């Protein structure tokens, strides 16, 4: 039996920033409300589609691992904002990064998607089906945003993160995991006007929109993620004090703080970057993982817990044993094509089309 060590990590954040003050130019909100209720100060707005964000993060992760894309057997892309549905977006990523020997597949479990994909790729490596995989979380969530709805417009951002998994004898990588779905509550968080359930034959189709019952999602996110963490700790026969770093999904700072307090973890054991990026759905965890490594939060052999919650309602928790290396073999250098537009300029036209 092999392990699936994480040997590469990379991210891609589009350059255009949209601050809380910028959003308050478009919709009735304020920096004070957004910061106090969510912890978000700014988010990134992408000028390119999801596959470019994903490919750039993946190329940085491959450099970090010192691997050639042709050595990859599988590209798994977690996203709920694909560039294209048919053909799948992972096939575009496979082409862009040059992973011509890899299978390519999209995974949609919304904000839990990265941990679902990590579990899937790890299982394939551990059973010997494949040797190397790139697992990506990439989203262009702001493409769905109705900029005239203040409740959802303030929450989301764009970005991507990726990891490279390699078969190894060293006990490392994803060692315990729990995923699940409370489908009875799937309506409390959804995107409307998108998909074949839209009755386009009998009514005009309006703009897409992210709809949710914020307080219900909040409660279920806290309970779902802490329950899943407890389950994973029991599977791994670990105690809370054995966990060195928590990498939670970044949907709301108050959700993260509630989980931190339930798990009784100190501040310096919890990775938080929501203030810079908002909720990038499936991309929050791999971006946060990269930044935890950049900041020296993850040491060799660290015990990492990660947890996510999203539409479906899907949830996931994962125990990751880090390997020996915490620095890239080749420093990340891949970037998006530049854009001279600010975040506000990028969304201004979109906001006029919303009703
Ligand atoms: O992952 C996808 C979606 N994520 C979530 O749903 C995350 C879970 N939920 C949350 O993070 C929080 O519930 C929110 C941040 C979404 C909302 O925070 P809240 O403390 O639950 O606020 P609320 O929805 O109860 O709204 C409180 C007030 C309302 O006004 P009234 O009815 O008290 O007069 C809202 O109309 O805040 C108002 N409000 C806003 N005011 C200024 C809602 N959005 C805004 C806004 N700016 N952007």
Image (cartoon, rainbow, N blue to C red):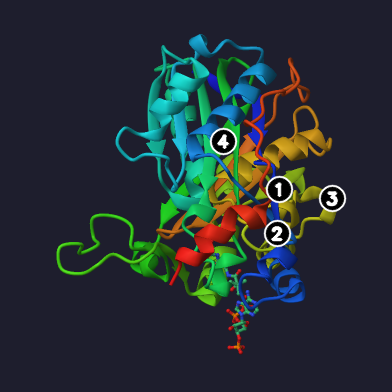
In the rendered structure, are the residues bearing label 2 and label 4 in contact, judged by CB atoms less than 8 Å apart? no
In the rendered structure, are the residues bearing label 1 and label 4 in contact, judged by CB atoms less than 8 Å apart? no
First of labels 3, 4 by sequence position: 4
Picture quarter containing residue 128?
top left
Disc 2 element:
helix
Q: Tell me what residue is drawn at x 76 percent, y 39 percent.
A: 292
Residue 6 visible to the viewer: no
In the rendered structure, are the residues bearing label 2 and label 1 in contact, judged by CB atoms less than 8 Å apart? yes
Q: Which label is found at residue 268?
A: 3
Disc 1 element:
strand
Instruction: Return the residue at label 2.
Output: 263
Instruction: Return the residue at label 1.
Output: 246
Disc 4 element:
helix
**Residue 294: x %, y % from top left:** 80, 34
Q: Nearer the viewer, mark 3 or mark 4?
A: 4
Figure disc tally: 4
Q: Depth check: 226 or 56 in front? A: 56
First of labels 3, 2 by sequence position: 2
């Amino acid at each position: 039996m092999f392990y699936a060590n994480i040997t590469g990590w990379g991210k891609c954040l589009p350059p255009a920033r949209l601050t809380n003050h910028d959003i308050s130019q478009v919709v009735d909100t304020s920096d004070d409300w957004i910061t106090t209720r969510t912890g978000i100060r700014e988010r990134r707005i992408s000028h390119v589609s999801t596959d470019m964000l994903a490919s750039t993060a993946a190329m940085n992760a491959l450099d970090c691992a010192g691997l050639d894309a042709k050595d990859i057997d599988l590209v798994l892309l977690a996203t709920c904002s694909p560039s294209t549905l048919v053909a799948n977006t992972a096939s575009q990523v496979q082409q862009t990064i040059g992973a011509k020997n890899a299978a390519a597949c999209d995974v949609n479990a919304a904000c839990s998607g990265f941990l679902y994909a990590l579990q899937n790729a790890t299982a394939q490596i551990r059973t010997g089906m494949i040797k190397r995989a790139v697992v990506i979380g990439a989203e262009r969530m702001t493409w769905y945003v109705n900029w005239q709805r203040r409740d959802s417009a303030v929450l989301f951002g764009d970005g991507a993160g990726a990891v490279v998994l390699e078969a190894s004898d060293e006990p490392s990588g994803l060692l315990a995991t729990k995923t699940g779905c409370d489908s009875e509550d799937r309506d409390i968080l959804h995107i409307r006007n998108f998909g074949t359930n839209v009755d386009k034959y009998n009514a005009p189709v309006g703009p897409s929109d992210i709809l949710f019952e914020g307080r219900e999602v909040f409660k279920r996110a806290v309970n779902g993620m802490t329950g899943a963490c407890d389950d994973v700790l029991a599977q791994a026969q670990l105690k809370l004090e054995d966990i060195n770093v928590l990498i939670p999904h970044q949907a709301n700072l108050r959700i993260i703080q509630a989980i931190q307090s339930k798990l009784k973890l100190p501040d310096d054991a919890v990775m938080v970057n929501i203030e810079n990026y908002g909720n990038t759905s499936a991309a929050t965890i791999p971006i946060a993982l990269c930044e935890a490594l950049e900041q020296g939060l993850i040491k060799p052999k660290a015990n990492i817990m990660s947890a996510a919650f999203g539409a479906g309602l899907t949830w996931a928790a994962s125990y990751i044993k880090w390997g020996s290396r915490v620095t890239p073999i080749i420093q990340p250098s891949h970037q998006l094509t530049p854009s001279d537009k600010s975040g506000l300029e990028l969304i201004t036209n979109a906001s006029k089309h919303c009703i």
